[in-house]
Amino acid sequence: MQNHGAFQVFFSYSPMALFYPVFGSLKIIFGPFEQCLNCKKNFEKNMKMMKRLSEELDSLKEDIELRISAECHAGTMQTEEVKNWLEDVQRIKSETEVIEQKAGDKKFLSGAFLGKKVEVKVVELKAFLKKGKTFLGLVKYFRYIIIGGGVAAGYAAREFDRQGLKPGELAIISKEAVAPYERPALSKGYLNPKGAARLPEFHVCVGSGGERLLPGWYKEKGIQLFLSTEIVKVNLGSRTLISAAGETFKYQTLIIATGSTVIRLTDFKIEGADAKNIFYLRELEDADELAESMKAKKNGKAVIVGGGYIGLEVGAAMRINNFDVSMIYPEPWCMPRLFTPAIAAFYESYYANKGIKIIKGTVAVGFNANPNGEVTGVKLNNGRVLEADIVVVGVGARSLTTLFKGQVEEEKGGIKTDKFFKTSMPGVYAVGDVAAFPIKLYNEVRRVEHVDHARKSAEQAVKAIKASETGKEIEEYDYLPYFYSRSFNLSWQFYGDNVGDTVLFGDNNPSSPKPKFGSFWIKDGKVVGAFLEGGTPEENKAMAKIARLQPRVENVDQLKKEGLAFASKI
Ligand SMILES: Cc1cc2nc3c(=O)[nH]c(=O)nc-3n(C[C@H](O)[C@H](O)[C@H](O)COP(=O)(O)OP(=O)(O)OC[C@H]3O[C@@H](n4cnc5c(N)ncnc54)[C@H](O)[C@@H]3O)c2cc1C
């Protein structure tokens, strides 16, 4: 108050008071000019702001359009209000472009006037952004997102934690209702008649002898698990993911770990293939349904369609559960992509000794069902009909790449990556079953649908992501293919490449109390692949070493005679 008074006194009694009316008039005359000058002063700053907001609006528009195109799954986005907003955005975009053009035109001199226009446009753009964001709801932003909550996702999470992760930085989005688990258990321990494996027993990373990551572990680390959440739309350009429920996720770095899906007989329109009690095995839900049905159809008849590792493992599990089991497959021997006829002959005889009927060189052409829609029989292409209470189909899988079609380079049915699992799209990595990556040892791009690679590729990708943030370098992925399977009391492991000539060694008599035999694959005079049934951990290690080092073979007969001893010497 006092100061104010002093001010008044100064103006009332000082000579300055004489000029006061003059200042006032000048202000009236020059006020608008002064305002325009101020606009011009802020011109540069506002132009930058206008450009940034315009880009932000572009990306928001894309997200909203993406969400609209996902509407078949999600909420109720296609309202009149949203449509009007999209039209208005188009208009404001054109107007902004005109301003930008004029600003770039050196002959355009009335900068002050343009400055005012930019200022108005900035206000307008901000209002549009605010409104647009309300259509999307809350966008969930994470530094890292993993799509898929399977084996690779779990191992990636552990590696992020090892490398240093702040709470809230990582999210895993999974279609499944449970935290990442060791998928191979589903066709093994999960189907045991007694003491069957159940979650939380086999959450990752127990399969490789590591710590079991329970849901509480993710919580404790500040890793968000979005379970029962399917991503239905992806825009890698704007780094946006949309879920079936309509949530929007944004990321800085994405890891694609969507794995594979089973090939279904309904895909080939096989008659009756949609009958009840015809099962596939990929996710926990599938295993639960099969286990339920096994209880309901106790001691019944089971037909296994397919002679791959799912067929062999589930066939054995059904037999152990006292089902009368038949297996059918079109090939002349089981596991034809890996086994030689000699290896396959052992397993086929072993299975026959256990009472499993194997019908080779045949396919299912249709299914019979009872009035309840439950399968009762499998029609074969040779006219035979096999009675069935339960059918389990294991005819292969295909990698889940559909969401990313046209957005990343693909190869060999998967997403092409480099040795660090980086895809062709910056900030996007692909691991596990979906990745088509270079195998250094064979100088070839391949896809590997096995758990060991899912684990290791996930770890490699995370190491690469973290290293790229700090400008460090890591070693290239140098993978030695490794597959395994277990059924009955059998257990085999394979390392390397199954190409070239083969040498069988050891005791492959299916009636032996403890059969132990193996095979080497020899290409260009070197051992490139090694298979062993019934090996100890040390023996399996020796087989891995031989496949990695690829020693020269001077005498094939000697190799056959020495067998495991040859590997142990290396
Ligand atoms: C029954 C069975 C037994 C097996 N046994 C063996 C074995 O003995 N030895 C061996 O080496 N390998 C085995 N495998 C193969 C091994 O499990 C796979 O190679 C491995 O799981 C691949 O890991 P991944 O993380 O790439 O994919 P997955 O483990 O399949 O995980 C993919 C995840 O992504 C989720 N997902 C997919 N699409 C979306 C989406 N749009 N939105 C959200 N989530 C999505 C899926 O629901 C799933 O949770 C077996 C596989 C099966 C099914």
Image: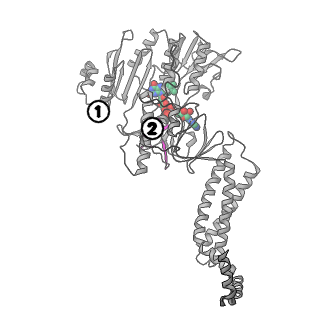
Element at label 2:
helix
Spot occupied by residue 130 in the image (x, y as percentages of width and height)? 67, 55
Residue at 41% in and 28% down: 208
Determine the residue positioned at 43% across, 50% down: 469
For this rendering, which residue is in front, 474 or 505?
A: 474
Kindly report which numbered mark, 1 or 2, lies closer to the viewer in this rendering. Answer: 2
Q: Is mark 1 within 8 Å of ligand 1?
A: no
Q: Nearer the viewer, residue 131 or 511?
A: 131
On whether residue 414 falls in the magenta region, the answer is: no
**In the rendering, which numbered label is found on residue 448?**
none
The quadrant of the image that shows the N terminus is bottom right
Please say which color scheme the image uses: one colour
The type of residue carrying mark 1 is Leu
Tell whether circle 2 marks a residue whose Cβ is less than 8 angstroms from ligand 1: yes
x then y, percent, for residue 159: 43, 39
- State the separation of the CA atoms marked 1 and 2: 25 Å
42 versus 319 height, above or below = below
179 in relation to 50, above or below: above
Specify few, some or many for label 1: CA neighbours under 10 Å numbering under 14, 14-19, or 20 or more. Answer: some
Q: Residue at x 68, y 53 (%)?
A: 132
Would you say 297 lies left or right of 412 here? Answer: right
Q: Quadrant of the C terminus?
A: top left
Task: Give the residue number, with chain letter if any, for mark 2.
Answer: 458
Give the number of the disc on residue 549: 1
Range shown magenta: 418-437
Q: Which sits in the foreground, 394 or 455? A: 455
* Residue 433 among magenta residues: yes
Which residue type does callout 2 highlight?
Answer: Ala
- Above or below, comparing residue 552 to residue 559 in the picture: below
